[in-house]
Image (cartoon, rainbow, N blue to C red):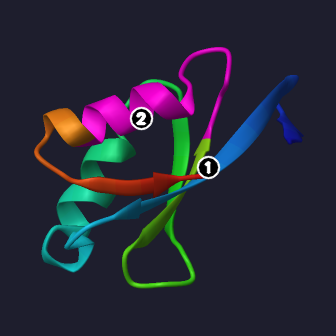
Amino acid sequence: MKPVNNQYLSQTLISIRNMESANEFIYDNLNKVEGVTHVNPGNKDDQVLIEFDPTRIDPSQIRNLLEQAGFSVKRIE
């Protein structure tokens, strides 16, 4: 974790099935979620690296948000 404004941020790498068809939607909408500070593409086409404030949101909540939006989350690290 790295300090930002006296708080520590965490990262999670999520793999999403068929993400290439919804890349822009995922990046735009995850960046608007309270507690998510940055969204980057992962090393592979179906991955997204999410930086977040663990005091405001956790990886399981991020996964739930993606699944509620209709995405199939393959893996979360």
Count the marks: how many? Answer: 2
Which amino acid type is marked by label 2? Ile
Q: Which residues are magenta?
A: 52-66
Could you tell me residue 9's position as x and y percent? 75, 36
Q: Position of residue 43 (x, y in %)?
A: 57, 83
Q: At which x and y percent is residue 55?
A: 67, 15
Q: Residue at x 61, y 49 (%)?
A: 12
C-beta proximity under 8 Å, tags 1 and 2: yes
In the displayed structure, 54 sits above or below 16; it is: above
Q: Earlier in the sequence, mark 1 or mark 2?
A: 1
Measure the alpha-carbon separation of dots 1 and 2.
Answer: 9 Å
Provide the secondary structure element on which disc 2 rests.
helix
Quickly name the residue at label 1. Answer: 12
Give the left or right position of residue 18, taking residue 44 as reference.
Answer: left
Vertical position of residue 37 compared to residue 14: above or below:
above
Q: Quadrant of residue 69?
A: top left
Q: Secondary structure at mark 1?
A: strand
Neighbours of disc 2 within 10 Å: few (<14), some (14-19), many (20+): many
**Percent coordinates x, y for residue 52 in the rendering:** 61, 37
Q: 16 above or below 52?
A: below
Type of residue at label 1? Thr
Q: What residue would you read off at disc 2?
A: 62
- Position of residue 70 in the picture relative to residue 48 (left or right): left
Q: Is residue 34 above or below residue 39?
A: above
